[in-house]
Image: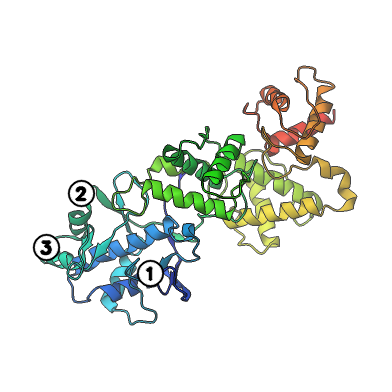
Amino acid sequence: MAIRYPIVPNSIIVHLGAPNTAAENISVNFSDYISNVASSELYPTWPVNSLKANIYAIISFAMNRIYNEWYKSKGYNFDITSSPVYDQTYIKDRAIYENINNIVQELFNDYVVKSNQIQPYFTSYCDGRKKTCNGLSQWGSVDLANNNKTPIEILKYYYGNDISIFKDAPVGENQYGFPGYTLKLGSPGNPVMEIQRDLNRIRINYPAIPEIPGNLGLYDSKTDEAVKKFQEIFSLPITGQVDKATWYKIKYIYTSVKKLFDLYSEGLTPQEVDFLYKDELKYGDTGIQVEYVHYFLNTISFIDSDIPNLKTNSVYNDNTKTMVMAFQKKYNLPVTGIITYSDWKVLRDVYDKLLKSYPSIYSEFVLELYPDYFLTYGMSGDDIKRLQGFLLKICRFDKSIPGVRVNGVFDELTESSIKKLQNDYNFDVNGIVGPLLWKKIVELSKR
């Protein structure tokens, strides 16, 4: 498990106007954006400690908007506006003060957090003369700095003694948000874990939504039921699947019930963002993600001579690295031997296309290929029927297996047979069919 701390984005999309007005959206380097806002709202002659306190607040405010997908969850295609009525003042192409820019370059990946919370704190503020508010007073910070208060002391004066500065946050591509594909029965991964976490919190305010037990990050029948009830409550098409519209509606309601955009937020604890799946896989890693990578690479290498077909197990080893580097080279990815989020998306896409266009010379093996998602109770379709066909063959020589009906429905009898096989061959006994168990079932069916 790994805590997913916020990433300072390389860039931020700014809407040059109020949220609901027709205006240009521009992509701005994040530190350049902070320098622009600070130069637009602060005076370069202010004391350094006042400037630093205000810049911390500007950074944290912007990070809060991005991390909580505040505008995207409302259906907009930008991260923040240029309007001080809604957000912070941004003036396109304005001159930047050198001393302010120097401070920003020092601080741009530091932000304010509350005690035992990981989300960037909603550091609301106002000028303190024309307008007052519950947050930081910009002119008030000048008085405090002139009284020898440090930046953190100024911030604590306005936001409370339980705040601190999270320093040197990672900078890069923001990997969170809608994953780019619909989540449905059998989908695994951190996006599923995130939706399950969100729905379990939302149900406190909307108890009609059923609880989702477990923490495997697998889209099971319980998740399907919870999503359908959420869709019913909030007038969305009742599909049981999380497409982009459902994803962002869940995000909007989750952010609202936890008040993540408020000074008095319920906040996110480290435990709430401690996810099972890693954002990158490398030498020495183990687990179901590694098994996925091995299965996909081995299958692709079966018909693609550019990818070496090497022996693998459940550990990311030298053979894994060799195969990954060959795959990266073939598909014009950075040849690192490490599977990143971007590599993973390409690998899935290549495997999916392979399933749809398998060469006819190998047609006899197509039915044996894993369908690229977990099979679990409540699912139905041709892939379940294929699984049941393999189970039926196993039952002919292993009479201890409860049995199976080849009806295309993952029912209780199918689940019981799967659990028996998992117990017999040292898999986790959970009734869920992943790539390695699928491979074992296919092998057993050929006896």
Up/down of 40 relative to 228, above or below: below
Which image quadrant: the C terminus? top right
Spatial separation of the CA atoms under disc 2 and disc 3: 18 Å
Q: Which residue is mark 3?
A: 148
Going by the numbered disc 1, the residue's amino acid type is Ser
Q: Is residue 307 left or right of residue 31?
A: right
Q: Is residue 135 left or right of residue 177?
A: left
Farthest right residue? 361
What residue is at 39 percent from the left and 82 percent from the top?
93
Q: Which residue is mark 1?
A: 31
Q: Nearer the viewer, residue 424 or 36?
A: 36
Q: Nearer the viewer, residue 398 or 140?
A: 140
Q: Quadrant of residue 66?
A: bottom left
Q: Which mark is residue 161?
A: 2
Q: In the rendering, at what x and y percent does residue 101 appear? A: 31, 74
Which secondary structure, mark 3? loop
What residue is at 78 percent from the left and 43 percent from the top?
369
Q: Is residue 142 left or right of residue 296?
A: left
Going by the numbered disc 2, the residue's amino acid type is Asn
Q: Is residue 226 left or right of residue 65?
A: right
Instruction: Give the mark nearest the N terminus, 2 or 1.
Output: 1
Q: Quadrant of residue 327?
A: bottom right
**Label 2 vs label 3, nearer the camera:** 2
**Label 2 vs label 1, nearer the camera:** 2
Q: Residues within 10 Å of mark 2 (few under 14, many from 20)?
A: few
What residue is at 50 percent from the left and 34 percent from the top?
211
Instruction: Give the mark nearest the N terminus, 1 or 3.
Output: 1
